[in-house]
Image (spheres, rainbow, N blue to C red):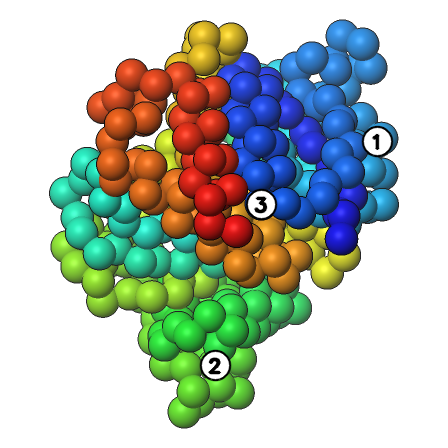
Amino acid sequence: MSYAVTLIPGDGIGPELAEATKGVLEATGIGFDWDVQQAGEATIASEGTPLPERVIDSIRRNGVAIKGPITTPVGSGFRSVNVGLRQALELYANVRPARSMQGVETRYRNVDLIIVRENTEDLYAGIEHRVGNDAAESIKIITRFASQRIARYAFEYAVRNGRHKVTAVHKANIMKLSDGLFLESCAQVAAEYEGRIGFEDRIVDNMCMQLVQKPELYDVLVLPNLYGDIVSDLAAGLVGGLGVAPGANIGEKAAVFEPVHGSAPKYAGQNKANPTALILSAALMLRHLDETPAADAVEEAVRSVIAEGRTTTYDLGGSAGTREFGEAVASRVRGSV
């Protein structure tokens, strides 16, 4: 069987990571028909936008995409391509696993968290305007529909993957209407899973402290958009940083898989960047396609190469390049499928 997949190489180090990841995916023996679509800084000069409509059309047509990092300017410039894709394709669930790996130096062991972030509304949606010259206003929108939808996704994820507890994260003690509605919606969905999946809630600032002190107490976290963005980076820090943090953006009709980290333009073309996050994102894509044995093979190959430490990139204490690390992982995958 062959899958049509939109491939967005991205900016900076993105094309190198994408090439390494392609090699790993093709090592599974599964057929891929790559629909390569350029987006980001490179398309602004030629097409006047970082997110041409052809990219969205390709993902709609194929139903699945894998994407390298794309630069998002801070404070000015074009709007985030990631946010544009999520909203255009209604990719309402952002899923970011954070799992400890032998060979990745960190203060923690045996962390195994799943961050489920609502992806379409809240402050992160970027609905804002200036109020005169010296003030700006952002609008926080929380709806029952989106809150229940993401809560149900989190509980269904827990059921499918043998998880035991979902924790809703909020600031309902202060934002009693907006975050109060999110918490109420999560509790309503949780009632449908009573006896199967545990449920609790935590205030977001307390949740950050709890994760730093005792991450082993938590399993699946479900959060509104902005808190999810922040807490998922915190969770990545527990397991070694953004370089090993995969991500998935899931909707009813399409899914986009991408690393969490940025495009690191100063390292572009140097064969230095660590492709682990994008390769693990590709494993999430394989799971989405119900190619579970291949997904397991890719994840285990990454973990074994890193644990051995002989062919790792500089950020993991080694001297291998992006290409060499990808080839080492691909070789392991070929030997196990």
User: Which is more toward the observer, 302 or 162?
Assistant: 302
Q: Quadrant of residue 315?
A: top left
Q: Residue 57 at what x, y percent from top left? A: 85, 38
CA–CA distance between discs 3 and 1? Answer: 31 Å
User: Which is more toward the observer, 179 or 9?
Assistant: 9
Q: Secondary structure at mark 1?
A: helix
User: Which is more toward the observer, 93 or 316?
Assistant: 316
Q: Residue at x 57, y 39 (%)?
A: 27
Q: Residue 177 at what x, y percent from top left? A: 50, 65
Local crowd at mark 1 within 10 Å, few (<14), some, or many (≥20)?
A: few
Q: Residue at x 33, y 37 (%)?
A: 305
Amino acid type of the residue tagged 3 in the rendering: Thr
Q: Secondary structure at mark 2?
A: helix
Q: Quadrant of residue 115?
A: bottom left
Amino acid type of the residue tagged 1 in the rendering: Glu
Local crowd at mark 3 within 10 Å, few (<14), some, or many (≥20)?
A: many
The residue identified by callout 3 is 28
- Is 10 rendered above or below residue 233? above
The residue identified by callout 2 is 190
Q: Residue at x 52, y 51 (%)?
A: 337
- Is 335 rendered above or below residue 186? above
Q: Is residue 140 among the parts visible in the rendering?
A: no
The residue identified by callout 1 is 53
Q: Residue at x 76, y 53 (%)?
A: 1
